Every structure is written in C-alpha cells, then in structure tokens.
Image (tube, helix red, strand yellow):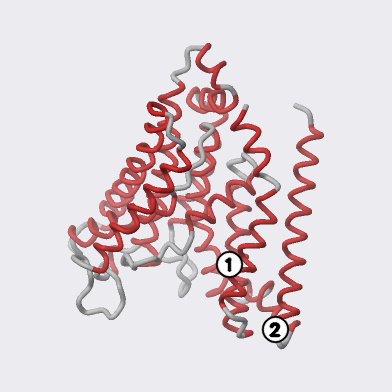
C-alpha cells in the first residue's frame, strides 16, 4: 500500500472540514446580531448539558446505521440513492407491527420482530434496484431514487389516510405504548439503547469486511468486476446482495427510530437522514470504523445549526443553506475517488 495517496486524501478532508467551519463562522458573522453568542450556540451548546448532548448523540445513531448501508453499497460499486424511501418504509412497517401487536407483547420480542421487519422491507426495495441493474442494465442510482420517491408518496398516503391518528392534529399514526419503546439513556434526552446496536454493527461489519470470505469477495467485486468473474465469484449475486444489505440497514434505522425516539410514524419524520448518510459514508472514506466519527460530525453540524436557529433567530432557510454548503465542501473531495472506482 502506498501511504502517500492516503496522506493526500486525509489532508484534503481536513482542508474541506476547515473550510466548512470557516464558512459557518462567516455566515454567523453576517446574519447574527450577536456573533460570539451565535458561535457559542453552534460549537458549545450541543455539549452544554445532559439533554442537548444526549440528543446530539441520538441524531448520530441513525446516521451511523444508514451510513454503513451506503458504505456497503459503495463496496459493490453501487450508489444507493433510495435511502430515504427505504428508511421510511422500514419505519412504517415497524410502526404498523408495533401497533398491531399491542402493549401486551413482550418488549424484547417486539423490538426484535420490528427490527427484522423494518430491515427486510428496506432490503426488498433496494434489492429491486440491484436486480434491475444486474439483469437489465438499469442504473441503480436512477432506479433507487425513483423507487424511493414512489414509496415515500405511498407511505404518506397511508399516514395521512387509513393510519392517521384521529385524536391528533398532526399527520401521524397512533402512539406506540410507552412500555414497548426502547429504554432511554441520558434521560431526559431522546438517546436510547439503539446506540449500542449501532456500535455493534460497526464493529461486526468491519470484522466481516476484513476477516470473512464474503467481505473479501465483495471487495474484489467492487474493485474489478472482470477479475471477480474470472475468479468465479458470483458478481451478480454480490451486487444485488450488497444493495439488499444497504437497504436493510436503512430500513433498520427507520424501525429503530419508530420504537425509539419517535414512538410513532410522522409524515416526513426522516428529515433527510437518507441523504445525510451518503455524506457520512463519503466522509468515512471507505472505513467502517470511520463511520462513527463521520456520523458524529454530521450530527454535530445539525445540532449546532438548530441551536443557532433557536437561540439567534437566524432564518431556517439560511441554516439549511449553511448545512448544504458545508456538506458539499466536505463530501465533494471524496466523490472523484468514488467515480474513479466505479468506472474502473
């Protein structure tokens, strides 16, 4: 391995992060009446007390799980753009199942069933895109994005129609019984025990990538399709399987949100998690263990921005533009690397 390209890549990433943070300071200086106060709200408030810190960590959990899904798709030379729909569908199935089973169900059994159901539906949707690419040559980026758009509109119909909570003024399903929700950590924040599952998944997938035949062959398929086929590796199976695993992790993230911090399925609750997960995977630069700091950084950007919006009165549109431009600077340096690998 040549360490020089890795060093240059790390330098570019550090430069992108530095430029992003400098841009943040510039925006706060222009639009806030109290620059130093806004700066403290952005950089310090997320760590200022138990509640804010717990919420910051909670925001990183679905990003970690979904970011792993994106990374696995990358490994197979796929780009999964349907994460929003896969996460949303996993959340809806989890919510329906939790409500149908009722409060008399054993909580541990429900958590397991709901998590598996959410992962399976997300895997099924993503596998469709993988199969279309493998057998019909349809770009998985286009098909996953379009499938996601369809799925999200169908789910919105159910949330605002047959599954709408008649006792609520919001567009949401009924509330899941409190005893069936995941136990909290750092109460009164929304952080729950799914954080431990996210860390376990990071370690497990990292070990599988380095120590198992599946991980080795998946890496070969992503690096060189022709060589993989020459070695007798079933490239089509790995390509579809990687997309299914990617969608499954998205679906799992959605299910855990519903039985965790959300407690119900609200219309549009995912708030761009599917897209942010792509930024997390690009920031991680192909490393499973790098997913954790990448997810924490992206969650920090969101948490700090929200603190500034609430405390300094900066319009939400400016905050959205700030987040988008910041993530653009950070992830743009990784995209050429992925394109070279994809076209290899």
The quadrant of the picture occupied by the N terminus is: top right
Dot 2 alpha-carbon crowd within 10 angstroms: few under 14, some 14 to 19, many 20 or more? some
**Looking at the image, which residue is at 38% across and 56% down?**
256
Given residues 161 and 25, the one toward you in this image is 161
Q: Position of residue 55 (x, y in %)?
A: 52, 69
Dot 1 alpha-carbon crowd within 10 angstroms: few under 14, some 14 to 19, many 20 or more? many
199 w.r.t. 269: above or below? above
- Count numbered badges in the picture: 2
Q: Position of residue 6 (x, y in %)?
A: 76, 37
Marks 1 and 2 in Cβ contact (< 8 Å):
no
For numbered disc 1, what is the local secondary structure? helix
For numbered disc 2, what is the local secondary structure? loop
- On the image, which quarter does residue 10 sit in? top right
Q: Nearer the viewer, mark 1 or mark 2?
A: 2
228 lies left or right of 21? left
Residue located farthest toward the bottom when viewing the structure as drawn: 33
Q: Pointer 2: what residue?
A: 32
- Earlier sequence position, callout 1 versus callout 2: 2
Q: Position of residue 133 (x, y in %)?
A: 42, 32
**Looking at the image, which residue is at 31% across and 45% down?**
121
**Looking at the image, which residue is at 27% across and 49% down?**
113
Q: Position of residue 12 (x, y in %)?
A: 77, 48
**Looking at the image, which residue is at 72% across and 62% down?**
20
221 lies left or right of 33? left
Given residues 172 and 201, the one toward you in this image is 172
Q: Pointer 1: what residue?
A: 302
* Mark 1–mark 2 distance (CA, rounded to whole Å): 17 Å
């Amino acid at each position: 391995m040549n360490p020089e390209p890795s060093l240059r890549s790390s330098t570019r990433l550090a430069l992108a992060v530095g430029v992003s943070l400098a841009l943040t300071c510039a925006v706060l200086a222009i639009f806030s009446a109290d620059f130093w106060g806004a700066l403290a709200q952005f950089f310090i408030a997320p760590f200022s007390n138990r509640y804010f810190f717990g919420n910051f960590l909670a925001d990183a959990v679905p990003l970690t799980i979904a970011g792993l899904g994106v990374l696995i798709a990358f490994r197979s030379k796929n780009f999964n753009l349907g994460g929003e729909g896969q996460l949303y569908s996993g959340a809806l199935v989890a919510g329906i199942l939790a409500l149908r089973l009722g409060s008399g169900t054993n909580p541990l059994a429900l958590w397991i069933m709901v998590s598996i159901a959410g992962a399976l539906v997300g895997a099924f949707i993503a596998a469709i895109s993988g199969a279309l690419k493998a057998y019909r040559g349809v770009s998985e980026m286009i098909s996953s994005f379009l499938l996601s758009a369809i799925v999200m509109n169908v789910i919105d119909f159910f949330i605002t129609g047959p599954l709408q909570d008649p006792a609520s003024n919001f567009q949401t399903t009924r509330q899941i019984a409190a005893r069936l929700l995941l136990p909290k950590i750092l109460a009164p924040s929304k952080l729950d025990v799914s954080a431990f599952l996210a860390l376990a998944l990071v370690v497990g997938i990292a070990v599988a990538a380095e120590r198992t035949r599946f991980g080795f062959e998946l890496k070969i398929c992503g690096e060189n399709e022709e060589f993989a086929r020459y070695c007798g590796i079933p490239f089509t199976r790995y390509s579809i399987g990687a997309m299914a695993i990617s969608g499954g992790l998205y679906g799992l993230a959605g299910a855990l949100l519903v039985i965790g911090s959300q407690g119900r399925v609200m219309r549009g609750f995912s708030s761009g998690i599917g897209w942010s997960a792509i930024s997390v995977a690009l920031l991680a630069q192909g490393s499973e263990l790098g997913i954790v700091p990448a997810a924490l950084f992206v969650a920090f950007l969101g948490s700090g921005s929200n603190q500034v919006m609430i405390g300094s009165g900066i319009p939400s549109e400016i905050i959205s533009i700030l987040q988008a431009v910041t993530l653009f600077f950070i992830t743009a340096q990784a995209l050429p690397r992925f394109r070279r690998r994809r076209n290899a």
